Amino acid sequence: MTCVLSGAFWDGGVRYGAGDFVEAWSTLGALYKALGRYDEAEECCLKVCGLAPRDAAIRHVLATVYFEQARVDEAIAAVRQSLALDPNDPSAHSTLLRMLWY
């Protein structure tokens, strides 16, 4: 368990061996975000965006990564992209309101 939390398992087992596995990249991005490793989270999210251009959820995650780094304009753009793909996502609407309020 410690290896997973430190990112070591994921770095060796997924990040460099995942190829085009969207779910693996998404999970890795979420883990990096949870660990506060935002540059690596962003890299993973952007990889998923390239592999799955219709994935609204990863754009929502990317928006929160940007927001945590005070990159507010990029965060708002990413959450708007998420909403364009899934306009009925209440979580993304809530995130957008929070960002606009900021």
Image: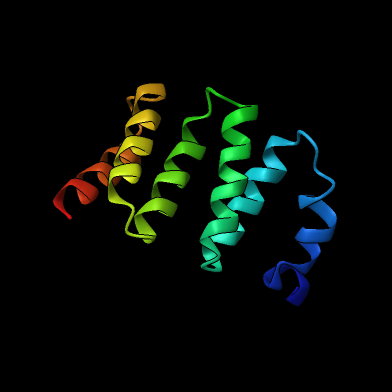
- Between 27 and 88, the one lying in front of the other is 27
Please name the residue shown 40% across and 45% down the image.
63
Query: Which colour style is shown?
Result: rainbow
Above or below, 2 against 87 in this view is below
14 to the left or right of 54: right
89 to the left or right of 26: left
Location of the C terminus by quadrant is bottom left
Please name the residue shown 68% across and 40% down the image.
23
Q: How many marks?
A: 0
What percent of the width, then of the height, locates residue 11? 77, 60
- Between 89 and 15, the one lying in front of the other is 15
What percent of the width, then of the height, locates residue 22? 68, 36
Please name the residue shown 56% across and 68% down the image.
35
What percent of the width, then of the height, locates residue 56? 47, 31
Please name the residue shown 54% across and 57% down the image.
39
Q: Is residue 30 visible?
A: no
Q: Is residue 60 visible?
A: yes
